[in-house]
């Protein structure tokens, strides 16, 4: 084993139909494997291309599919065929309203994670979604050995607690499907989440040909300091451009694990007994907003 995990970001545009997205998604995964990927990651809600704006909620929520539907299971079968993990995203049919969901299949085709977006964008169309209930970490079987993998989806990134919980549960790598402009401040959020938690984050966005998206899919490896280097280093090991494509990053697991074993961030010097305010539900001005769930 080389200790290098190869992560493919499928920065591809949807086709306008479920079957079209299935076929194009399967092709994208095959291309990722041809490039040598150990894991392939889709952008947010690939099953319908995150097509939820400018449509009445009953129209787009009708796009929801079951977690064990033909669409989703097809990627599990392909994962086993390709000997490559696949993280596919979809609008999941769910009681009370659909969920914005990620399913992670290992290279044996076994589902290791089913994660629904916890921080739904309740200020807009996503108010019609059912939020997820928790964050999960799984020991993903890869050709480089087991890797502790968790997931966030888009707006989850805006909350430091999301990545912090995943770190506390052992995550070494967080997968982040995305569907929004990845400008400097959002990229800075990802950089900060990796730095403060000493883990890697892989984010896959839609290309600029998709409305309100601009590519910029990225991987941050979280390793800010090397023993023999005088200063800090750039933790961004991949940032895609605007164009559609399959982009491959090489994550040095040995380097990351050595860094996590020696540096001061993450969980080394936290004082959780001082953080009680973080779990209070009170919201005061100027942060009051319509649409907040009680």
Image (cartoon, grey):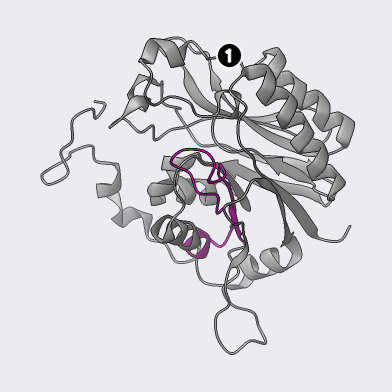
Which residue appears at 50% of the width and 49% of the height?
214
Q: Secondary structure at mark 1?
A: loop
Which residue appears at 70% of the width and 23% of the height?
22
Q: Is residue 133 left or right of residue 11?
A: left
Residue 217, magenta (yes or no): yes
Q: Position of residue 270 (x, y in %)?
A: 42, 62
Q: Position of residue 121 (x, y in %)?
A: 35, 33
The quadrant holding residue 77 is top right
Numbered range of the magenta stretch: 194-220
- Provide the residue designation for mark 1: 65
Which residue appears at 48% of the width and 44% of the height?
213
Q: Is residue 292 left or right of residue 229?
A: left
Please state the total of marks drawn on the protein image. Answer: 1
Residue 206, magenta (yes or no): yes
Q: Position of residue 123 (x, y in %)?
A: 28, 32
Furthest residue toward left: 285
Image quadrant where one finds the C terminus: top left
- Residue nearer the viewer, 248 or 150: 248
- Rendered view: 188 above or below 21: below
Whether residue 267 is visible: no
- Residue nearer the viewer, 82 or 179: 179
- Residue nearer the viewer, 155 or 22: 22
Whether residue 265 is visible: yes
Q: Position of residue 60 (x, y in %)?
A: 45, 16
- Rendered view: 18 above or below 194: above
Q: Residues within 10 Å of mark 1 (few under 14, many from 20)?
A: many
Which residue appears at 44% of the width and 62% of the height?
188
- Rendered view: 158 above or below 283: below
Image quadrant where one finds the N terminus: bottom right
Q: Is residue 56 left or right of residue 181?
A: left
Furthest residue toward front: 209
């Amino acid at each position: 084993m080389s200790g290098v995990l190869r992560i493919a970001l499928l920065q591809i545009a949807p086709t306008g139909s479920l079957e079209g997205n299935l076929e194009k998604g399967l092709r994208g995964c095959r291309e990722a494997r041809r490039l040598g990927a150990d894991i392939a990651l889709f952008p947010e809600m690939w099953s319908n291309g995150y097509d939820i704006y400018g449509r009445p909620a009953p129209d787009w929520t009708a796009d929801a599919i079951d977690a064990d539907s033909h669409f989703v299971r097809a990627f599990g079968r392909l994962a086993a065929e390709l000997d490559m993990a696949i993280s596919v995203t979809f609008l999941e049919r769910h009681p009370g309203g659909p969920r914005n969901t990620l399913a992670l299949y290992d290279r044996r085709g076994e589902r290791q994670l089913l994660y629904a977006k916890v921080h739904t964008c309740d200020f807009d169309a996503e108010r019609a979604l059912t939020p997820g209930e928790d964050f999960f970490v799984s020991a993903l079987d890869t050709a480089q050995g087991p890797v502790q993998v968790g997931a966030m989806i888009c707006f989850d990134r805006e909350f430091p607690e999301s990545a912090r919980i995943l770190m506390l549960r052992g995550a070494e790598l967080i997968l982040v499907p995305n569907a929004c402009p990845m400008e400097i401040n959002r990229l800075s959020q990802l950089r900060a989440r990796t730095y403060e938690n000493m883990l890697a984050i892989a984010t896959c966005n839609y290309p600029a040909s998709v409305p309100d998206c601009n590519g910029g899919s990225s991987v941050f490896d979280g390793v800010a300091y090397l023993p023999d280097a005088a200063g800090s280093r750039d933790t961004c090991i991949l940032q895609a451009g605007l164009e559609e494509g399959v982009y491959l990053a090489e994550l040095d697991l040995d380097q990351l694990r050595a860094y996590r074993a020696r540096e001061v961030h993450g969980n080394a010097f936290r004082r959780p007994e001082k953080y009680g305010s973080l779990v209070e539900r009170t919201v005061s001005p100027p942060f009051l907003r319509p649409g907040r769930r009680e």
